[in-house]
């Protein structure tokens, strides 16, 4: 009995060590991907950039579970603050973490209940939708007001950047709904598509299995 217990404990310890190693690797990749960003000025103000740094968290949430997906998002942003620094007193990184974590956790939580290809697709789509919906209240109540405080930029100037793309007399909530929500949704769908394409080839590495 003791031998069996010891063997089980060793197996669990090995699994935990492997999971932590994979999560650390994915966090590092996510941190690097944060630097590969570019604006789409025809569609959204240039201070909002497109990147695929949520992709490693999505891979992690499917391979290891939703808690690991959230942890990857957290470590990615902590590394960004510690190694690159922050120009927003951490507000931008907090927003990136909350949105990415909502995406990864939702997708991972749903996938654990239906581990099929269809289940993965539904999980990704739902996670992207949750992230897109969350971006509106998060930006409206937290992120943009914080930028006004830390940068001293009037909210009218921020809204003016949106009005330069789509002329009109409208406010911040309209901007976030018409611009940020679909942009964030498309960003999530891009991550989901890439995850769908590369998850299976990477599965042996993520799960610690030999090919």
Image: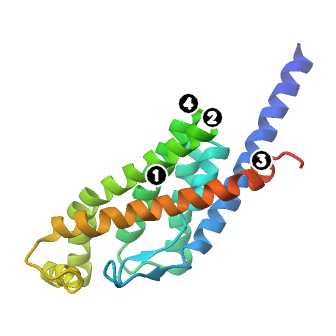
Q: Decide which of tag 3 and tag 1 comes sooner along the chain.
A: 3
Query: Which residue in the protein does label 3 denote?
Result: 18
On residue 103, which mark appears?
A: 1
Number of dots carrying numbers: 4
In the drawing, does residue 173 fall left or right of residue 14?
Answer: left
Q: Secondary structure at mark 4?
A: helix
Is the residue under label 2 in contact with that under label 4 (CB below 8 Å)? Answer: no
123 is higher (above) or lower (below) than 3 = below
Query: Which residue in the protein does label 2 denote?
Result: 115
51 is higher (above) or lower (below) than 140 = below
Between disc 2 and disc 1, the foreground one is: 2
Is the residue under label 1 in contact with that under label 3 (CB below 8 Å)? Answer: no
Residue furthest out toward the right: 3
29 is higher (above) or lower (below) than 23 = below
In the drawing, does residue 24 fall left or right of residue 41?
Answer: right
Between disc 3 and disc 2, the foreground one is: 2
On residue 132, which mark appears?
A: none
Q: Residues within 10 Å of mark 2 (few under 14, many from 20)?
A: few
Residue 47 point in image, percent of width and height: 35, 82
Residue 28 point in image, percent of width and height: 65, 66
Q: Decide which of tag 3 and tag 4 comes sooner along the chain.
A: 3
């Amino acid at each position: 009995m003791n031998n069996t217990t010891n063997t089980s404990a060793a197996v669990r310890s090995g699994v935990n060590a492997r999971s932590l190693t994979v999560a650390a690797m994915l966090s590092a990749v996510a941190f690097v991907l944060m630097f590969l960003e570019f604006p789409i000025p025809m569609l959204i103000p240039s201070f909002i950039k497109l990147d695929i740094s949520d992709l490693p968290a999505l891979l992690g949430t499917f391979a290891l579970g939703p808690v690991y997906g959230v942890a990857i998002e957290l470590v990615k942003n902590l590394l960004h603050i510690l190694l690159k620094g922050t120009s927003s007193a951490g507000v931008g990184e907090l927003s990136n973490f909350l949105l990415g974590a909502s995406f990864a956790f939702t997708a991972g939580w749903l996938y654990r209940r239906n581990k099929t290809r269809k289940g993965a697709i539904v999980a990704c789509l739902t996670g992207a939708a949750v992230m897109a919906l969350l971006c509106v209240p998060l930006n409206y109540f937290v992120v943009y007001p914080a930028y006004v405080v830390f940068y001293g930029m009037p909210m009218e100037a921020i809204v003016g950047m949106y009005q330069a793309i789509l002329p009109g007399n409208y406010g911040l909530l309209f901007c976030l709904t018409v611009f940020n929500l679909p942009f964030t949704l498309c960003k999530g769908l891009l991550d989901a598509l890439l995850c769908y394409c590369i998850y299976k080839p990477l599965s042996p590495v993520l799960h610690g299995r030999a090919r």
